[in-house]
Image (tube, grey):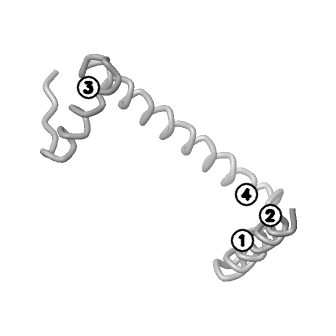
Amino acid sequence: MEVHVRPEVQAKLDQMVRESGRPTDELVEDAIIGYFDELAYARETLDRRFDDMESGTVKPMEGEEARRRLMEKTEAQRQRRRSA
């Protein structure tokens, strides 16, 4: 198989080959495997969430409400770190 990448990607790959001492084909294969593993994980997570919503186990919320809750959690974590 032959893979063509943009010059900036090739430069990053060449740097990783130099730094790791691993052959290019191994690095590319690992990257592809990792990508597919992450894609499968994301798909499984989305499927579970969809099933949870369909069954009523999880209730959907508006985007602004989700954002507000996330910001509150983030601020609470920052406060804990500051006081630690």
| Local secondary structure at mark 4 | helix
Which residue is disc 4 drawn over? 54
Which residue is disc 2 drawn over? 81
Q: Residues within 10 Å of mark 4 (few under 14, many from 20)?
A: few
Q: Nearer the viewer, mark 1 or mark 2?
A: 2
- Residue 57: give its label: none
Contact between labelled residues 1 and 3, with CB atoms less than 8 Å apart: no
> Residue at (18%, 47%) from the top-left corner?
8
Q: Residues within 10 Å of mark 3 (few under 14, many from 20)?
A: few
Image location (x, y in percent) of residue 58 = 79, 60
Which residue is disc 1 drawn over? 70
In front of the other: 52 or 6:
6
| Local secondary structure at mark 1 | helix
Q: Quadrant of the C terminus?
A: bottom right
Image location (x, y in percent) of residue 65 = 72, 80
Left or right position of 42 against 20: right
Q: Residues within 10 Å of mark 1 (few under 14, many from 20)?
A: few
Location of residue 5 by image quarter: top left
> Residue at (27%, 25%) from the top-left corner?
17
Is 13 placed above or below 26 here? below
Q: Nearer the viewer, mark 3 or mark 1?
A: 3
- Mark 4 or 2, nearer chain start: 4
Which residue is disc 3 drawn over? 18
Is 4 placed above or below 7 here? above
